[in-house]
Image: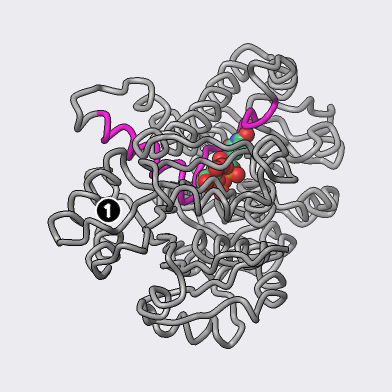
């Protein structure tokens, strides 16, 4: 392998760590910089502060190429490309909070030989604003490249090493070429690589917009199928069959057509809202995104109506939540449906018990008033109703007869359509998925109460 360019990565959160270890795996020396001294100490000691399958192993494998420091100067001394992966959380207005990005910009010295490569998701126009700030601060020689991140939590390493596409936005010059060179091994043959990735070399604003538009489109797909699911519940169609039939059309595709109890996570809710605000701030009312957001909010709350349909008042009812993270294979609780659901249940007087295989510690910090237990079995014991919130694979193996036996009631709401409805019914549960109607109940099963 030819000698690979060393890089700096600023911010050792989720995106920063995966980017750092990904480039280390491809052969670069990587200086990881973070202002959090405690985090850097932990990383130096080999401790990985987030849960991501395969990440700890890959960090270990590439230990000799990964350097952790709180000193920006170490990255500036050893690398000319500085990838920025700091947080851009939503503010109260729904805009992105760019204070961490601006702190990084402000910390850069004048230089003719360095470039910032923006991985953090930022509003369209941020690159232009940063270039202007560089000019004003007498750092006009600093280059700027937009290189948005498309990693999915849970499969982030594979997404980095085997991307669908790599998007690089710049205004010509050495920096965009150098970033392209770094990604070369994961690009397709026609882009000089030996993998699958397509390459989009474009201007900075378009690169920034690709990221926001992609996430907004995927979120729209989810809200769309969730609305179809709700209509299926009214009409007796089965959304799983409908999604299968739709997804076989090449133009639609099968992915992101899983109906459920809403999308969460660090990206979709924030990016949809950021794009809506960005449009609004520039004078355009993005109607469709308003609906996408509202449908998602209502989708989380529909579970409450389903529970009330079966149980009547929820006061004093014990409701078990299986899975708390916003999706499986992560301990990330950001915008998780469990947050809204548990708060609504508690407000309605229910006793809420929750279990998550990985996210319990994170959940403990956020889910006030929820009893957290160590296993699915412990959660369902004595419950009047169970809600499957996150489709962790282990829930597929639940012994449903045993579940029905230890519950106080029999209601099982499968918020992710993970289980086999007829099997759940045969096990004695009153099973309801999303957009699938009530699974047929045997003669002996408890008749649902109406309110
Ligand atoms: C997402 C984007 O996929 C990724 O490209 C971007 O970089 C960051 O945001 P992530 O948040 O990790 O990644 O999760 P993803 O797997 O995309 O799921 C997001 C949410 O949508 C989850 O809450 C998931 O449960 C939900 N979802 C996803 C559905 O409800 N139905 C689906 O069909 C797919």
User: Percent from the top left, x then y, of residue 192?
Assistant: 67, 42
Residue linked to disc 1: 97
Residue 153 showing in the rendered view: yes
Magenta region includes residue 302: no
User: Percent from the top left, x then y, of residue 218?
Assistant: 53, 32
Q: Is residue 344 left or right of residue 247?
A: left
User: Percent from the top left, x then y, of residue 324?
Assistant: 57, 56
Magenta region includes residue 271: yes
Q: Quadrant of residue 278?
A: top left
Q: Quadrant of residue 60?
A: bottom right
- Residue drawn at x 47%, y 43% as measured from the top left: 168
User: Percent from the top left, x then y, of residue 222?
Assistant: 55, 30
Quick check: 209 above or below 406?
Answer: above
Q: Nearer the viewer, residue 244 or 410?
A: 244
Q: Nearer the viewer, residue 179 or 355?
A: 179
Boundaries of the magenta span:
254-279
Give SS at disc 1: loop
């Amino acid at each position: 392998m030819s000698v690979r360019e060393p890089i700096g990565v600023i911010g050792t959160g989720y995106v920063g760590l995966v980017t750092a270890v990904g480039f280390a795996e491809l052969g670069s020396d990587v200086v990881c910089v973070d202002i959090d001294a405690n985090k850097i100490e932990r990383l130096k000691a080999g401790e990985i502060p987030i849960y991501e399958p395969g990440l700890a192993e890959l960090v270990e494998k590439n230990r000799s190429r990964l350097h952790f420091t709180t000193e920006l100067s170490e990255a500036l001394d050893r690398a000319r490309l500085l990838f920025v992966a700091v947080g851009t959380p939503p503010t109260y207005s729904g805009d992105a909070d760019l204070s961490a990005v601006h702190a990084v910009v402000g910390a850069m010295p004048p230089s003719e030989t360095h470039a910032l490569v923006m991985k953090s998701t930022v509003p369209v126009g941020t690159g232009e604003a940063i270039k202007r700030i560089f000019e004003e601060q007498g750092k006009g020689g600093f280059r700027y490249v937009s290189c948005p991140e498309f990693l999915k939590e849970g499969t982030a390493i594979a997404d980095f090493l085997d991307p669908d596409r790599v998007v690089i936005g710049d205004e010509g010059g050495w920096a965009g070429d150098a970033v392209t060179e770094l990604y070369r091994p994961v690009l397709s043959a026609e882009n000089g690589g030996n993998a699958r990735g397509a390459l989009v070399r474009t201007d900075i604003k378009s690169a920034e917009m690709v990221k926001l538009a992609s996430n907004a489109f995927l979120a729209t797909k989810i809200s769309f199928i969730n609305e179809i699911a709700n209509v299926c519940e009214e009409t007796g169609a089965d959304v799983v069959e409908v999604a299968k039939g739709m997804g076989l059309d090449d133009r639609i595709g099968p992915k992101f057509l899983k109906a459920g109890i809403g999308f969460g996570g660090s990206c979709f809710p924030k990016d949809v809202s950021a794009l809506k605000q960005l449009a609004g701030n520039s004078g355009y009312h993005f109607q469709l995104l308003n609906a996408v957001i509202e449908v998602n909010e209502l989708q989380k709350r529909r579970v409450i109506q389903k529970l009330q349909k079966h149980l009547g008042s929820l006061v004093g009812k014990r409701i078990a939540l299986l899975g708390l993270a916003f999706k499986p294979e992560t301990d990330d609780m950001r915008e998780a449906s469990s947050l809204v659901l548990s708060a609504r249940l508690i407000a309605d007087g229910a006793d809420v018990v929750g279990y998550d295989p990985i996210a319990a510690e994170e959940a403990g910090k956020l889910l006030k008033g929820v009893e957290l237990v160590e296993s699915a079995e412990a959660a369902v014991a004595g419950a009047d109703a169970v809600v499957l919130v996150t489709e962790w694979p282990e829930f597929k193996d639940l012994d449903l007869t045993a579940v029905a036996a230890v519950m106080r009631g029999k209601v099982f709401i499968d918020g992710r359509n993970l289980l086999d409805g007829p099997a759940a019914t045969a096990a004695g549960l009153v099973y309801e998925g999303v957009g699938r109607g009530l699974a047929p109940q045997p003669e002996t099963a408890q008749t649902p109460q109406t309110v």
